[in-house]
Image (spheres, rainbow, N blue to C red):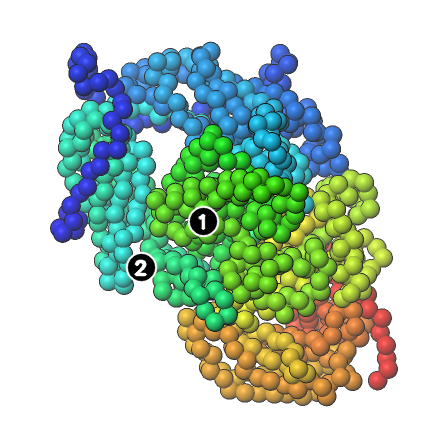
C-alpha cells in the first residue's frame, strides 16, 4: 500500500549495538516481547545532603516545593519569604527511590533508564554505581543499565548548587559576559530572578523518569513529515528511527483515523536505522488557527510488528497545514508575517512565560484553563519566551487542539553566552532533543534563537570598554550558536522557519519600525506616552507592555491577611522592577485620576494598563498589512506579583485581558483622530467579506443624541481600511461630555476625544439584578448615565464573562458570573465615574 511511485528508503545511520560481527556469541532465544515502559514515579524521598533524615518527595517535584509540603519552610510566595529562602539554592540535595522489576521484564535483552528532565547538575547512582552526570535541565538523558538492573533496585540522585559550576566556568574566561552567572547553566534563566520573577534557583526531578526494556527492536523517534498539501491530496512521510538488535524481517504499519494505509515488510539489519514510509490522505481537512477555521487533527499511529506480534507502537494527532514565514524586501523595508494555508494571517496574542516558578506545580488543568483564556481573548498566537522552558508536551497538544499558533524561542535570553566546545556541544544536543520532541506539533510556526541578546550587544552598552579582539570573540561565539548550530538543527530536522533573534533591531535603531519584529519599550522603560504606540507601528510587534496591579485576591495572598495593603514591606518584594511603582503612578497622573485608597488604586492601575496596551493593539491592527502581528508582554505570571500580565497568578483576568478580547476580535471597529478628523476603521481578519451599514452616533453622557452618521460599506476579507471620516473640530466645546458609538454587524466600538481624567462623567445610580442560571448567575445592570469602566467583583470564586466595560445610558447589560457555588454572590462594583469631579458648566 502507499504511493506506488515511491520506494521505502532504509538508511543505516550507526551500527554500534552488540559485539563485532566476527565475535562469537551464544545463540540467544528469540523473543517477541513488546517494548516495556516502567515509570519510576513512586516512593521518592529527599534530604539535605548533610542530614540523615529522609522526607517524602513528590514526583515530579522541586526541592522548594518538597520542603514546603513537608512543612520545613513557609510558602515561598507569601510575604517576603523569598528573601529568607535563598539558602536552598546553596545546598546539596539528595533524592532516592527503590523499585522492583518483575522477572519477565528483567529477562529482556535491553534496558534503558530515561531522565526527561533533571534540574540541573545531577549525579545519578543505580544500585550504588555511578551511571550519569548531567549539566542541562532541557536535555533527555538516557543510560544503558542492562548490567546493573536487578529485581530490587535503589536509585539515588544528588543535586549540587549551580554556583559551583558557574564559578568554575567563569574562571576559564579572561573577561566577563553579560548578564551574570546564569549564562553558564542550561536551565530556566528566569529562576535567577527577572523584573517580574522571584529568585528561586531550584533543583529537582522536573520531568519523567522511566525504564524502557525490549528484546528485538524499539522506536527511537517518529516524525510525520508533510511533503505536500493541496485540497485534493496530502502527501506525507513517516520518518521512523529504529533501534534493531538483530537482523530479521519486520512489518511497519501506518494507520490514520484507525484505517490502515500502509503495511510494509522490511528486512532490517542490526543497528540504528531510519526508515521513510510515504503515505497519502485524499481530500484532506486542513488545520486552521481557531479564529479562521477548525483546527482539525488526524489521529495517526505507527506500529512495528515481528512475526505478527506488536513490538512497539506510537500514536499522535497531526494537523495538516502549510505555514510560511515571509520576510521580503519592499518599499518600506522588509516584511515580517505568516501565511497559513496560503492566507496572510494577522497574529494576535501575547508572550507566554512559565506558569509557576516551580514547574512541577503546573497541572494539566492549569494548561487547559490558561489556553482556554487565550482562545476566549481571540488570541491566535503565543510566543514561548526564551528565558523560561521548552514546555511540556501537554501544552503543545492543547495548542494543536485549540488552534493556537506558537512562536517558540530557544531558551536563551538577554545575555551573551560562552563559546567553548563543551558548551556548544551541550547546546547542540539540547537543540536536537527539543526540536525532535516538538516537531510533530502543528501549532509551531517559528523557532527563534534568542530573546534580546543581539539587541543587548548592539544597544545596551555590553561592548563598552572591551578590546576589539574580545568583542570579536564574544560576537563570534554568538554566531556559532544563533547563526549556525540552531538554524542548522532546525532546517535539518523540521520544515519550520528559523529567526535568529527577537527583536531584529533594538528600538534605538530606526529600522525597528520597518524591518523584522520589534520590541517597543519606549513605553514603560523610557517613559514615552501611550500615544507613541499609535505613531510608531512596526512590521510585527513581538513585545510591548505595561504593568498593572494584580487582583485583590492576590494582594491578600501575598500579605497573608484580609486587608488590602499595597504599602507593606511584604507586598513591595512582589514588585520586581526597580521603579515599577513610580512608573505606574507617573503614567496614571497623565491619563487617569489618582485614587487615595488601595482598593481604588489597584482598580485604576488595571484600567491604565488596559488603556495603554489597548491603544497599541488596535493601532497595530489598523496598520495591516504593513503590520501583521501584535503580541503584548505578557499573558501570565509565574508567582503573585505586580507585573505586565493580563492574567494574574491565580488565573484572574485583569482589565488588560478583557481589553485584549475586545481589541483582538476578528471583526473590529477602531478609530483614531488624524488632522482633526475621526478616521473610523473596520478591520476584518475573516476570510470572507461583509456588507452592511456602518453607523456612528454621537451621544452625550445622558444618552442624548448629538449627531448620527450612516454609510453602507463593503468590507473585504483580510483587510483594514477607513470607512468613515468625521470632522471633530466642531465638537470641541462638548468633547469632555460625549462619546462616538460606532456599530457594524452587531459589533460596537466607543471612542472618546479626551483622556479619561478629562471626562466630565456624571453621577448616576446603577441598578442591578441577579438571576441563577445553569453555569452560575446572570447579572443585569443599567444606568441612566454613561458609566465608564464598570468593574464587577465579589469574594466568591468565579469568573465574570465581561468586566471593566463602558455602560451606555439606558443600556441593559447582562454579564454571566460563572461559579460552581450555588449561594447568591454579593456583587460589588466600581466605575471611573466615582473618581472624576463633575463640572456642571454647560
Where is the C terminus found, in terms of image quarters? Answer: bottom right
- Which residue is at the far front? 468
Residue 467 visible within the image: yes
- Which residue is at the far left? 4
Sequence order check: which comes first, mark 2 or mark 1? 2
Residue 672: image location, x then y, percent: 63, 76
In the displayed structure, 402 sits above or below 208; it is below
Residue occupying the point 54% across, 68% down: 621
Residue holding disc 1? 447
Residue occupying the point 26% across, 33% down: 13
Residue holding disc 2? 285
Residue 462: image location, x then y, percent: 63, 45
Residue 194: image location, x then y, percent: 65, 42
Task: Looking at the picture, tell me which residue is in the foreground, 289 or 784.
Answer: 289
Residue occupying the point 36% across, 21% down: 144
Residue 705: image location, x then y, percent: 69, 86
In the displayed structure, 329 sits above or below 211; it is below
86 sits left or right of 394 in the view:
right
Determine whether the residue tagged by mark 2 lies in a helix, strand or loop: loop
Amino acid at each position: 500500500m502507499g504511493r506506488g511511485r515511491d520506494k521505502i528508503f532504509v538508511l543505516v545511520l550507526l551500527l554500534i549495538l552488540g559485539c563485532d560481527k566476527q565475535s562469537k556469541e551464544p545463540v540467544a532465544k528469540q523473543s517477541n516481547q513488546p517494548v516495556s515502559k516502567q515509570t519510576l514515579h513512586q516512593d521518592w524521598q529527599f534530604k539535605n545532603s548533610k542530614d540523615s533524615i529522609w522526607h517524602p518527595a513528590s514526583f515530579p517535584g522541586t526541592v522548594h516545593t518538597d520542603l514546603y509540603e513537608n512543612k520545613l519552610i513557609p510558602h515561598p510566595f507569601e510575604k517576603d519569604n523569598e528573601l529568607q529562602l535563598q539558602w536552598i539554592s546553596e545546598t546539596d540535595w539528595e533524592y532516592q527511590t527503590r523499585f522492583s522489576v518483575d522477572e519477565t521484564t528483567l529477562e529482556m535483552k535491553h534496558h534503558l533508564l530515561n531522565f526527561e528532565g533533571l534540574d540541573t547538575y545531577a549525579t545519578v547512582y543505580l544500585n550504588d554505581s555511578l551511571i550519569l552526570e548531567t549539566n542541562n535541565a532541557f536535555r533527555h538523558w538516557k543510560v544503558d543499565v542492562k548490567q546493573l538492573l536487578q529485581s530490587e533496585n535503589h536509585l539515588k540522585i544528588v543535586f549540587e548548587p549551580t554556583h559551583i559550576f558557574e564559578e568554575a566556568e567563569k574562571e576559564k574566561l579572561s573577561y566577563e559576559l553579560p548578564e551574570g552567572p546564569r549564562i553558564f547553566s542550561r536551565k530556566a534563566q528566569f529562576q535567577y530572578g527577572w523584573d517580574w520573577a522571584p529568585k528561586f534557583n531550584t533543583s529537582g526531578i522536573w520531568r519523567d523518569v522511566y525504564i524502557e526494556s525490549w528484546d528485538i527492536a524499539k522506536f527511537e523517534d517518529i516524525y510525520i513529515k508533510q511533503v505536500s498539501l493541496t485540497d485534493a491530496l496530502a502527501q506525507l512521510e513517516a520518518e521512523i528511527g529504529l533501534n534493531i538488535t538483530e537482523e530479521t524481517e519486520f512489518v511497519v504499519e501506518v494507520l490514520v483515523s484507525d484505517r490502515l494505509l500502509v503495511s510494509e515488510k522490511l528486512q532490517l539489519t542490526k543497528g540504528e536505522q531510519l526508515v521513510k514510509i510515504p503515505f497519502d490522505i485524499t481530500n484532506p481537512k486542513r488545520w486552521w488557527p481557531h479564529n479562521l477555521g477548525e483546527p482539525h487533527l488526524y489521529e495517526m499511529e505507527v506500529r512495528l510488528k515481528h512475526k505478527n506480534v506488536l513490538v512497539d507502537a506510537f500514536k499522535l494527532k497531526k494537523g495538516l497545514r502549510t505555514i510560511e514565514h515571509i520576510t521580503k524586501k519592499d518599499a518600506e523595508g522588509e516584511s515580517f508575517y505568516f501565511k497559513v494555508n496560503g492566507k496572510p494571517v494577522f497574529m494576535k496574542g501575547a508572550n507566554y512565560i512559565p506558569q509557576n516558578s516551580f514547574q512541577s506545580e503546573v497541572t494539566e488543568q492549569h494548561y487547559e484553563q490558561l489556553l482556554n483564556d487565550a482562545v476566549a481573548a481571540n488570541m491566535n498566537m503565543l510566543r514561548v519566551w526564551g528565558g523560561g522552558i521548552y514546555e511540556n508536551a501537554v501544552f503543545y497538544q492543547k495548542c494543536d487542539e485549540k488552534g493556537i499558533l506558537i512562536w517558540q524561542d530557544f531558551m536563551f535570553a538577554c545575555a551573551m553566552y560562552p563559546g567553548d566546545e563543551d558548551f556548544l556541544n551541550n547546546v547542540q544536543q539540547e537543540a536536537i532533543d527539543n526540536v525532535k520532541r516538538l516537531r510533530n506539533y502543528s501549532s509551531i510556526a517559528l523557532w527563534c534563537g534568542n530573546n534580546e541578546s543581539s539587541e543587548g550587544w548592539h544597544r545596551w552598552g555590553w561592548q563598552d570598554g572591551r578590546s576589539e579582539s574580545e568583542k570579536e570573540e564574544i560576537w563570534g561565539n554568538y554566531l556559532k550558536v544563533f547563526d549556525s548550530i540552531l538554524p542548522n538543527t532546525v532546517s535539518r530536522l523540521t520544515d519550520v522557519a528559523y529567526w535568529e533573534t527577537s527583536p531584529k533591531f533594538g528600538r534605538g535603531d530606526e529600522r525597528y519600525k520597518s524591518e523584522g519584529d520589534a520590541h517597543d519599550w519606549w513605553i514603560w522603560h523610557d517613559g514615552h506616552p501611550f500615544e507613541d504606540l499609535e505613531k510608531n507601528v512596526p512590521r510585527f510587534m513581538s513585545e510591548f507592555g505595561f504593568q498593572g496591579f494584580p487582583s485583590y485576591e492576590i494582594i491578600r495572598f501575598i500579605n497573608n491577611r484580609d486587608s488590602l495593603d499595597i504599602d507593606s514591606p511584604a507586598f513591595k518584594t512582589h514588585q520586581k522592577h526597580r521603579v515599577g511603582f513610580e512608573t505606574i503612578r507617573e503614567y496614571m497622573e497623565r491619563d487617569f485620576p489618582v485614587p487615595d485608597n488601595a482598593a481604588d488604586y489597584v482598580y485604576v492601575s488595571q484600567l491604565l494598563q488596559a488603556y495603554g496596551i489597548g491603544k497599541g493593539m488596535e493601532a497595530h491592527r489598523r496598520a495591516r498589512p504593513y503590520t501583521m502581528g501584535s503580541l503584548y508582554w505578557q499573558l501570565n505570571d509565574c508567582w503573585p506579583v505586580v507585573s505586565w500580565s493580563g492574567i494574574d497568578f491565580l488565573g484572574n483576568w485583569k482589565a488588560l485581558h478583557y481589553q485584549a478580547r475586545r481589541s483582538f476580535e476578528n471583526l473590529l471597529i477602531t478609530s483614531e483622530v488624524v488632522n482633526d478628523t475621526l478616521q473610523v476603521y473596520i478591520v476584518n481578519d475573516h476570510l470572507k467579506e461583509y456588507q452592511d451599514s456602518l453607523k456612528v452616533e454621537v451621544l452625550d453622557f445622558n444618552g442624548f443624541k448629538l449627531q448620527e452618521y450612516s454609510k453602507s460599506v463593503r468590507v473585504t476579507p483580510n483587510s483594514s481600511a477607513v470607512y468613515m471620516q468625521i470632522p471633530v473640530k466642531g465638537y470641541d466645546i462638548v468633547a469632555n461630555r460625549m462619546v462616538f458609538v460606532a456599530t457594524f454587524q452587531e459589533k460596537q466600538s466607543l471612542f472618546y476625544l479626551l483622556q479619561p481624567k478629562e471626562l466630565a462623567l456624571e453621577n448616576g445610580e446603577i441598578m442591578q439584578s441577579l438571576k441563577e442560571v445553569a453555569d452560575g448567575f446572570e447579572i443585569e445592570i443599567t444606568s441612566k448615565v454613561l458609566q465608564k469602566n464598570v468593574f464587577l467583583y465579589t469574594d466568591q470564586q468565579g469568573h465574570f464573562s465581561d468586566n471593566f466595560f463602558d455602560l451606555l445610558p439606558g443600556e441593559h447589560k447582562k454579564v454571566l458570573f460563572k461559579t460552581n457555588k450555588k449561594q447568591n454572590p454579593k456583587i460589588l462594583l466600581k466605575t471611573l465615574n466615582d473618581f472624576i469631579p463633575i463640572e456642571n458648566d454647560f
